[in-house]
Amino acid sequence: MPYFVERLMENQGSAVVVQKADTVAAALDLMIEHDFSQLPVVDENRTLLGMITYESILRAARSFNAKLDELFVRDAMMPAPFHYREDDLFDLLDELKATNAVVIIEPGGRVIGVVTNYDAAEFLRSRTEDLMHIEDIEFIIKELIKRTYMDENGELNLDRLQTAIGKPRTRRGEQSGASKPKAFEDLNLGDYINLLMSRAIWNFCAPILDVQKESLYELLVKIRQTRNDLAHFRSEISPRSRDELKYCASWLRSRYQDYEKEQGSRFIDTLLRQHEEDEMARAAREESTAYHLALDADGKPEEGKTTSRSRYAALADWLAAQKEERVSLTFEQVEEIIRSRLPDSAFQIRAWWANDRVGHTHSILWLEAGWKVAYVDLGEEQVAFARIKPNEGGG
């Protein structure tokens, strides 16, 4: 299902317009009042004739060497790009590459609204935010499932996990061995929800989540439907669905973070004592290094070497230089090491710190350096890294 232009106009009121006989000064007052950088120009029937913008006003004033109250809209009017409400959003985006605003009209030419670059960006941002919440929900569910099959040393028993993946298939009456169960990372959100609800995993997770199993399942089923609607463009999600999505992501982050705090306290308390924190801050400042290019005899980059690398390479370099098995850093210390700000998502989205070998450049770097995130506390803005042991995937 495509996204239609009308979705960008849901909260817009009646379009603010001017006519050719209006003064430029009056048009400018309207633009300032509504914080617009352009206005459609219409006739008495609100049929589109053109557009007036800050740029076209300046051009007219300079050309005529006239004051604004001496000019009329017709003197500063320019052709207006337009689309219809039923047009595909992505066709409109192509138009917005060349201009800041597109007028939306009815088939007869009557103006019904204006869509700007800002409107399109906000629309797409909200969809991206929804998908980020989905990613975080799925990530935490996966982490809870994996925690069920970890030993006292934090090692994941892949055989037990893979056996658990195959059990629901057997209960549905499928022949054992008819087809090999999927790998854990290849499952979909529905599969992860069903695994979470299975007896063994729920018995482990129930004290962590502290909620009625049936209630959580009902909420997660709705989240799964919302995820499918977003992923397949089936329909616009309702305000209630969006609110449930945000609530579920926030609630799961809170419950999982409380659990991580409890589990991590054995080494986090030690690592973050004032003396150790001071030492870590000093080490971060002294040992933080930027990526150095391999140079030839003339001091030029060696052939085949790139001149740029992710800023997170400095974090990977710093971790690779550590002697301990576990280290803890505040987000501020991480920023000192990479010599730049962490993105907002690092402070808000638990999945940003996932040990992802595919989708996240920053995590690929620390995994390749032989380290993984063992614990992260978004509230306290702290992250603990642990050295990856031999034969351990780090995911």
Image: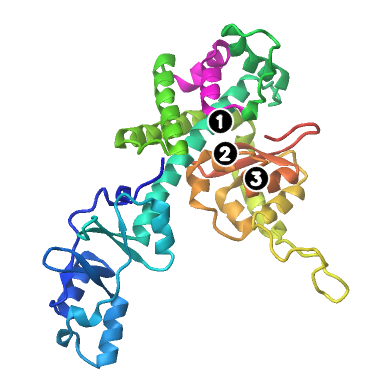
Q: Amino acid at mark 1?
A: Glu
Image coordinates of residue 303 in percent, x first then y, are 82, 67
Please report whichever mark, 2 or 3, sits nearer to the chain's N-terminal start: 3
**Foreground of the two, 3 or 258:** 3
Q: How many marks?
A: 3
Is 197 in the magenta? yes
Q: Please provide the residue range marked out in magenta.
A: 187-210
**Foreground of the two, 4 or 56:** 4
**Badge 3: how crowded within 10 Å, few (<14), some, or many (20+)?**
many
**Foreground of the two, 345 or 56:** 56
* Above-or-below relation of 329 to 33: above
**Badge 1: how crowded within 10 Å, few (<14), some, or many (20+)?**
some
Q: Is residue 275 visible?
A: no
Residue drawn 65% across the image and 57% down it: 310
Image coordinates of residue 210 in percent, x first then y, are 44, 19
Q: CA distance from mark 2 to mark 1?
A: 8 Å
